[in-house]
Amino acid sequence: MSEIKVTLVKSTNSSNKNHCATIKALGLRKIGQSVVHSDNAAIRGMLHNVSHLITFEEV
């Protein structure tokens, strides 16, 4: 199963509360922090919701 590396590149200060909650659920706290998640539909949906705040790539 493939994995996805997610990196927070923009601040969540002016984002709505749902986007902030999604970033927190992905395990991201600081700009530049990266986490690796398994590639599944739930994670892909979360990434789509906050795509303007993050970058992601397959590992």
Image (spheres, grey):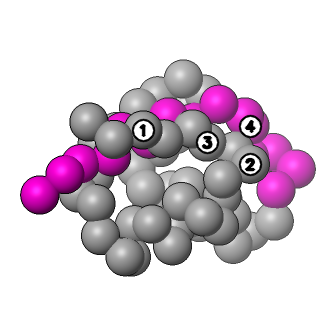
Crowd rating for badge 4 (residues with CA inside 10 Å; few <14, some 14–19, many 20+): some
Crowd rating for badge 1 (residues with CA inside 10 Å; few <14, some 14–19, many 20+): few
Provide residue 28's location: percent of width, then percent of height: 47, 43
Q: Closer to the observer: label 4 or label 1?
A: 1
Q: Tell me which secondary structure the magenta stretch mostly adopts.
A: loop
Which residue in the structure is indicated by mark 2? 52
Q: CA distance from mark 4 to mark 1?
A: 19 Å
Circles 3 and 1, Cβ within 8 Å, touching? The answer is: no
Circles 3 and 2, Cβ within 8 Å, touching? The answer is: yes
Which residue in the structure is indicated by mark 4? 11
Q: Closer to the observer: label 2 or label 4?
A: 2
Which residue in the structure is indicated by mark 1? 57
In the image, what residue type sits under mark 1?
Glu
Is 10 one of the magenta-colored residues? yes
Which residue in the structure is indicated by mark 3? 54
**Which element type, helix, strand or loop, lies under badge 2?**
loop
The magenta stretch is: 1-15
